[in-house]
Each structure stands twice: as structure tokens, then as C-alpha cells.
């Protein structure tokens, strides 16, 4: 069995991957060729696997774990990955815990799948990408900031869960800004709070250019904002079309208006199959459209 495992590791290395295990984590250095590929084997990693930063510019970074429940990286209050010198970053199959920031990146394309972040200050700080695609991601117990995602092109987020998250300003779970298209599908948020801002769970701000928003199968259970939009706040005259369907909220509040949903756009709004229960606002309304 040991011989088979060694042969497997050699084969992976031959294809240009750096293979990391909990026993050789101190050797977890990014490759120095045009593409950086890293494979984390199953196990629990210490903070030696954190504070990654590329000193050279690479074409792509691919990080592949053995599956988010099986590959856990404990950063002990440090940052996990600061990726700014890549064209594409692709991450799958890892869980990051106890990180000041799990992923801090400003690259052209970001692809995340089967990635979790828990007990961290800020989980995703994705700034000024062109496209962002996230599927099967989860965030829990993020204490110091929302997941910030900005893209000059499109943002797609599907099959995502957020639990026990809060921010100092707007967007308790998510703060989003897009360029052309924003699509949120099958997103569940429980216990989110925007301490000093709008959007108790989700804040979507004025896009970089004319853009559309499509939200479907969104469930928000218990969220609050100090301003407007206890569950979701969408603001921006540059949105051409906003579609919200299969939208359910429970126990949401915003003293300045829109106890569950606040939409401020002069363009098209399509709202269907929405159920908003136990929402509180200054005028008593669950949904406010301006």
C-alpha cells in the first residue's frame, strides 16, 4: 500500500504539482514556473500552511484539496492566501479556519468550488476581478467583515450557505459589486447582521457599468441592518434589470426602511414568489421599492 501511495505522489509531481501533507507542510512553497499547482492531501494543517504570498507573477494558481470536510487548514489568526500576481485563481476542496482573512485576491478570474471558511475575521476579499464563479461554498462565524466580492464583469454564486456572520458596515454576509451580471442561486443565510450600514444579509451596490441582477431561491433566516434592507439592499441607477424570485425571509429588521428587502433603482424590477415573515421597519413595510 505504501508503494502505491509513493507512486501516486511521484505521478502527481511529474505533472507539475506541489503535493502538501500535514507532515511536509513546511515545504509548501508556490512553484516558480508559469503556473502554480498545489495539492493538499487530506488532514488537518497548522498555521505553517498559511501566509502564502507569491513573489513572482504567475499565469495561474490552482489549489486542490481532498474535499472541504477532509482538508482543514488552521491559520491561527493569520491570513491564509494573498493572491495578487495571477491571471486565474482556482481553489477547491479546502476548509480554512481561524484566519484573519481566508482569501485576499485581486486577479482577473476567480473560481471557487467546495470551499469552506469558519471562525475567521473575513473570509473572501475578492477585489476587482473580471469574473468570479463560486459554487458549493460555505461561511460561518465570520466576525469582522462580510465576504466582499467585486468584478468588472460577472459574478456567479450558487449553492452557498452563510451562518453567524456580521460586518461593521453594510452587508452582514455579502457585499457585492459587479460590472455586467450578478447571479445568486440557491443561497441560504442564517443570523447575519450589518452593524452600521444597509443590507443585513446582502448589500448589492451600484455596478461599474450597466448590469443585471438575478436572484433565485434565496432564504434568509434572522438578519438585521442599522440602515435600510434588513435582509437585502440593492442600490444603483446603473442596474438595467433586477429579478428576485423564490425569495423567503424570516425575522428581519431595518429601522430606516425595507424590513426584508429594499430596492433603490429606476430601472426594471421583477419580484415573484416572495414570502417575508416577521419583518420590521420604520413604516412597517417588509419590501420597499424606490
Image (spheres, rainbow, N blue to C red):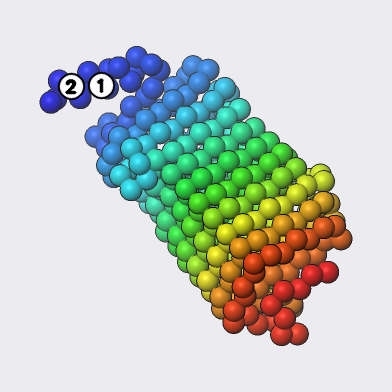
Secondary element at tag 1? helix
Q: In the visual, does 163 lie left or right of 238?
A: left
Quarter of the image that includes the N terminus: top left
Numbered label attached to residue 191: none
Marks 2 and 1, how far apart in space? 6 Å
Q: Position of residue 275 (x, y in %)?
A: 62, 73
Foreground residue among 184 and 33? 184
- State the residue at coordinates (52%, 61%): 188
Q: Position of residue 73 (x, y in %)?
A: 36, 45
- State the residue at coordinates (71%, 85%): 284
Q: Which residue is mark 2?
A: 4
Seen in the picture, residue 103 relative to 288 is either above or below; the reply is above
Q: For the view shown, which residue lies furthest in the front direction?
A: 273
Pointers 2 and 1 in contact (C-beta within 8 Å): yes
Quadrant in which residue 181 is drawn: top right
Foreground residue among 59 and 182? 182
Residue 198 visible in the snapshot: no
Number of numbered discs visible in the structure rendering: 2
Q: In the visual, does 136 lie left or right of 105?
A: left
Q: Which residue is mark 1?
A: 8
Amino acid at each position: 500500500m505504501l508503494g502505491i501511495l509513493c507512486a501516486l505522489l511521484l505521478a502527481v509531481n511529474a505533472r507539475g504539482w506541489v503535493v502538501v501533507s500535514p507532515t511536509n507542510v513546511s515545504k509548501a512553497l508556490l512553484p516558480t514556473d508559469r503556473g502554480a499547482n498545489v495539492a493538499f492531501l487530506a488532514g488537518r494543517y497548522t498555521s505553517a500552511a498559511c501566509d502564502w504570498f507569491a513573489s513572482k507573477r504567475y499565469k495561474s494558481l490552482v489549489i486542490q484539496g481532498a474535499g472541504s470536510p477532509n482538508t482543514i487548514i488552521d491559520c491561527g489568526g493569520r491570513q491564509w492566501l494573498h493572491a495578487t500576481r495571477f491571471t486565474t485563481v482556482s481553489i477547491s476542496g479546502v476548509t480554512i479556519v481561524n484566519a484573519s482573512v481566508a482569501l485576499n485576491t485581486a486577479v482577473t478570474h476567480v473560481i471557487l468550488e467546495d470551499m469552506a471558511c469558519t471562525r475567521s475575521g473575513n473570509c473572501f476579499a475578492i477585489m476587482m476581478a473580471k469574473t468570479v464563479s463560486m459554487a458549493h461554498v460555505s461561511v460561518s462565524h465570520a466576525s469582522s467583515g462580510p465576504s466582499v466580492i467585486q468584478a468588472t464583469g460577472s459574478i456567479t454564486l450558487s449553492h452557498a450557505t452563510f451562518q453567524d456572520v456580521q460586518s461593521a458596515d453594510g452587508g452582514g454576509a455579502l457585499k457585492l459589486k459587479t460590472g455586467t451580471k450578478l447571479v445568486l442561486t440557491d443561497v441560504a443565510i442564517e443570523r447575519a447582521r450589518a452593524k452600521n450600514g444597509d443590507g443585513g444579509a446582502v448589500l448589492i451596490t451600484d455596478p461599474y457599468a450597466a448590469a443585471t441582477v438575478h436572484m433565485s431561491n434565496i432564504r434568509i433566516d434572522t438578519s438585521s441592518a442599522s440602515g435600510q434592507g434588513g435582509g437585502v439592499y440593492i442600490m444603483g441607477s446603473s442596474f438595467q434589470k433586477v429579478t428576485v424570485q423564490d425569495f423567503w425571509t424570516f425575522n428581519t429588521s431595518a429601522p430606516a426602511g425595507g424590513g426584508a428587502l429594499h430596492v433603490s433603482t429606476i430601472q426594471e424590477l421583477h419580484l415573484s414568489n416572495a414570502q417575508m415573515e416577521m419583518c420590521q421597519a420604520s413604516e412597517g413595510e417588509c419590501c420597499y421599492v424606490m
